[in-house]
């Protein structure tokens, strides 16, 4: 599914399986994450049986952060990646923890402060990054790209702020093999909303999350989108049979 296919026309897009005006999607996605912010980590553990932590560990390893690196974590949410990046970049490094959703950003900021980690925290839109060209050694986005209205524009912005030789890492839910699709759908559309209702008192938000995963580009399509954004050496790693995938690309 191409980014163009993800738009119905110039002013509408998809919110899960529903067609909405582009400006309406921004507000609807914000409502979802305002609703789930307080229970986000608990629900992530339940939804993935704790596997999201393993996927993030793999992503951190692939990032190869070294002391002094400048790192931008987009859609950083509760701060799982930023926390480790700060440790690895050290006192000479610079790690920006950013998100478009204030509720998620506050949760992440508080978690970082509780760990004794002080790093810049910024409310910002990935499609209009407030950073200069060629600034960061690494840019990451974990489980955030699928919620962005103009994914092609966001990827272009991520490339823009990378230094030559810098790496983009995109960790996102992806497509499982056909043989696993039926049980995965059953879990996603029956079990997941039920868990959302029981744990976060919000079935609808988790139903949207399941739908948003299905509307997200598959592994090969996202690879092509990253290449079209100007990234080189793009590759991906399927995690847990493609339930998630890590895409990486280099700015040359």
Image (cartoon, rainbow, N blue to C red):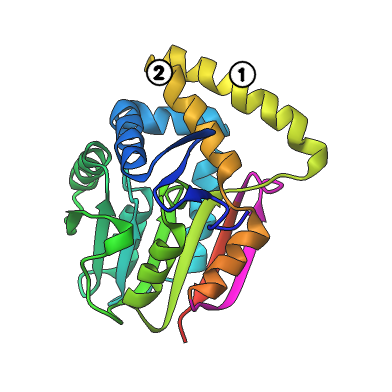
Q: Does residue 58 appear in the picture of this structure?
A: yes
Please state the extent of the stretch shown in magenta in the rendering: 230-244
Classify mark 1: helix, strand or loop. Answer: helix
State left or right for residue 234 relative to residue 91: right
Residue nearer the viewer, 38 or 23: 23
Residue nearer the viewer, 232 or 230: 230
The location of residue 124, given as percent across then percent down, is 23, 55
How crowded pointer 1 is (Cα within 10 Å; few <14, some 14-19, many 20+) is rated as some
Q: Does residue 237 appear in the picture of this structure?
A: no
State how far apart marks 2 and 1 are (Cα).
Answer: 14 Å
User: Which residue is denoted by mark 1 in the rendering?
Assistant: 190
Q: Earlier in the sequence, mark 2 or mark 1?
A: 1
Classify mark 2: helix, strand or loop. Answer: loop
Tell me which residue sits at (54%, 30%) in the image: 47
**In the image, is residue 233 part of the stretch drawn in magenta?**
yes
User: Which residue is denoted by mark 2 in the rendering?
Assistant: 202
């Amino acid at each position: 599914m191409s980014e163009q296919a993800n738009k119905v026309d110039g002013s509408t897009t998809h919110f899960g399986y529903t067609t909405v005006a582009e400006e309406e999607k921004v507000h609807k996605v914000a409502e979802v994450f305002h609703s789930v912010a307080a229970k986000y980590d608990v629900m992530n553990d339940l939804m993935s049986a704790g596997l999201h932590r393993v996927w993030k560990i793999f992503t951190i390893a692939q990032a190869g952060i070294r002391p002094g690196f400048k790192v931008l974590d987009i859609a950083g949410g509760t701060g799982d990646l930023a926390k480790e990046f700060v440790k690895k970049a050290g006192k000479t490094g610079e790690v920006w923890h950013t998100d478009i959703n204030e509720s998620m950003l506050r949760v992440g900021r508080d978690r970082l402060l509780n760990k004794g980690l002080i790093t810049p925290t910024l409310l910002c839109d990935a499609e209009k990054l407030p950073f200069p060209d060629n600034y960061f050694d690494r840019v990451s986005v974990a489980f955030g790209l699928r919620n962005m209205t103009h994914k092609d524009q966001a990827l272009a912005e991520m490339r823009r702020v990378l230094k030559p030789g810098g790496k983009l890492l995109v960790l996102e839910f992806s497509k499982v093999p056909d043989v696993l699709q039926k049980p995965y759908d059953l879990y996603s559309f029956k079990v997941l909303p039920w868990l959302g209702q029981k744990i976060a008192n919000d079935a609808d938000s988790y139903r949207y999350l399941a739908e948003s995963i299905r509307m997200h580009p598959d592994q090969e399509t996202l690879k092509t989108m990253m290449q079209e954004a100007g990234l080189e050496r793009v590759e991906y790693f399927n995690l847990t049979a493609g339930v998630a995938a890590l895409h990486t690309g280099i700015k040359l």
